[in-house]
Amino acid sequence: MASHERRPALEFDEPDTGFQAGFGFYVGLVAAGVAATAGLLAGVSTATLLGILPSMVTAVAIAGHILTRRARGLPERIGRSRWRRLACYAPPIAFAATLALPLVISIEATGRFVVLTLVVTLVTGVTAYGVDRMARNRYIDALTADEPAAVWTWRQTGLTSGGIVFGAYLVITIGGGLYSTIAWGLNVSSLMVFYGLIFLLQWYGIGGDWLNFDQNEQATPPTIRAHEAGLVVERSVSRTFVPWDDVADVRLTDDKLVFERRWFDLRCDPAAIDDPEATLEGIQRARGRADATRQPDLAD
């Protein structure tokens, strides 16, 4: 028998004001980027471009804002597909590719051309990331509209813990700084080594309490919610969804709560969970409801 994942039918409302404004601004920047690139290739002066582009961004952003409001379910439809989210990055990739135009056609790669292309690529890339995150978050919200069966604070344990990752980052920083200092004599690399060593010594408790910190302590620690559709890892600005189909097993030991997955397990420190046993019961209830929902989809 083969099981087929079935997601609950979603009811889409009109996009919220934040997504309308963000998506409209993204469309406006893309339109302005196209106009700026075309203007540069046509030899339009910088002063003329600077006079036209802000008005174009505003006009297209307003139009995009109005059209997005009528596109019911647009953020959820973008957020549910990895390819649609990746499509948001097509314009900045295309703008970056224009830097190779002087290699294939007879145009001069002036400093103005390079700088403006880089700025357009950066601005549209950042905005594309914002649209990607907003769409993903809204799709996860629509998919997990039910009350969570369990909610707990997530503090990682094991090889993927923040402490080990941060320590490795410090070692890489120090090593890269040393190599850059020796190979190229860069002064900034010496500062990288200096500050990296300070944090590394403090990491291992050497150097007093003047810079003491807890590597697992965070101002806003992420939380995990167990829903019928799956797990939601919620951070301050983003959410990650893990469907139950990706979880092979759940187990609680004295030192970790583990969600076994195909590639990377999700490990939680029980010390950060108020009631690990009750949390595990809630997780099993949510997972049981998901199994009951999928039961009619079993194929012979």
Image (cartoon, helix red, strand yellow):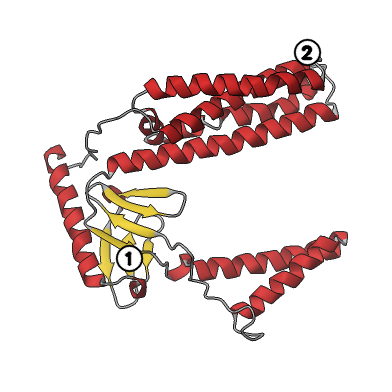
Q: Nearer the viewer, residue 85 or 247?
A: 85
| Residue ID at (20%, 42%) | 3
The image shows residue 47, relative to residue 274, as above or below, that is above
* Disc 1 target residue: 258
* Disc 2 target residue: 42
Residue 281 screen position, x and y as percent: 18, 64
Residue 295 visible to an observer of this rendering: yes
Residue 278 screen position, x and y as percent: 20, 68
Residue 51 screen position, x and y as percent: 74, 20
Asked if the residue at tag 1 contacts the one at tag 2, i.e. Cβ–Cβ closer than 8 Å, the answer is: no
Image quadrant holding the C terminus, namely top left
Q: Which mark is residue 17?
A: none
Residue furthest right as drawn? 185
Alpha carbon separation for disc pair 2 and 1: 59 Å
Please tell me whether mark 2 or mark 1 is closer to you in this view. Answer: 2
User: Which corner quadrant of the image does residue 139 belong to?
Assistant: top left
Q: Is residue 13 left or right of residue 289?
A: right
| Residue ID at (71%, 34%) | 119
Instruction: Say what amino acid the circle numbered 1 marks.
Output: Val
Q: Is residue 107 left or right of residue 38?
A: right
Secondary structure type for disc 1:
strand
Q: Nearer the viewer, residue 138 or 190?
A: 138
Residue 11 screen position, x and y as percent: 25, 31
The image shows residue 36, relative to residue 18, as above or below, that is above
| Residue ID at (44%, 19%) | 67
| Residue ID at (40%, 55%) | 263
Q: Nearer the viewer, residue 31 or 83?
A: 31
N-terminal of the pair, mark 2 or mark 1, is 2
